[in-house]
Image: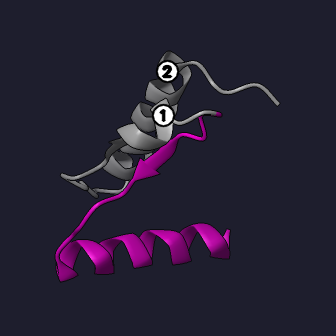
Amino acid sequence: MTAPHPTEVDAHLEQLRAALAANGITLPSLRVNLPSLTALPARPLIALGNCNLVTAEALTAALRRAADR
């Protein structure tokens, strides 16, 4: 498997950000973990970061709604 191109990683990050926003959720610390992107071989990670309890509750509710579909 070849390592994804950085623009592909950014595209996935923005898709995740948009999906979260569509559910009223903002994760301010959402970002690409740069050391994972520059490692050899590159295995990019998306860091979700920290969130407050209100955001954690909203994320939990959105995931439960999606699981019930």
The vertical placement of 59 against 35, above or below, is below
From the viewer's perspective, is 1 left or right of 22? right
Q: Nearer the viewer, residue 45 or 12?
A: 45
Q: Is residue 62 a member of the stretch shown in magenta?
A: yes
From the viewer's perspective, is 41 left or right of 27? right
From the viewer's perspective, is 21 left or right of 65? left
Residue visible at 48% across and 34% down in the picture? 37
Identify the residue under disc 2. 6
Under tag 1, what secondary structure? helix
Q: Which residues are magenta?
A: 41-69
Q: In the rendered structure, which disc, 2 or 1, sits on the residue that comes first in sequence?
A: 2
Q: Nearer the viewer, residue 26 or 67?
A: 26
From the viewer's perspective, is 69 left or right of 12? right
Query: Percent position (x, y) of residue 17?
Result: 36, 42
Residue visible at 44% across and 45% down in the picture? 19
- Label 2 and label 1: CA atoms lie apart by 8 Å
Identify which amino acid the numbered label 2 is placed on.
Pro
Q: Quadrant of the C terminus?
A: bottom right
Query: Percent position (x, y) of residue 65?
Result: 53, 72
Identify which amino acid the numbered label 1 is placed on.
Leu
The vertical placement of 55 against 5, above or below, is below
**Counting other residues with Cα less than 10 Å from the Cα at mark 1, is it few (<14), some (14-19), or many (20 or more)?**
some
In this view, which residue lies farthest toward the right? 1
Query: Percent position (x, y) of residue 61?
Result: 42, 77
Q: Nearer the viewer, residue 23 or 30?
A: 30
Q: Quadrant of the N terminus?
A: top right
Identify the residue under disc 1. 37
Query: Percent position (x, y) of residue 15?
Result: 47, 35
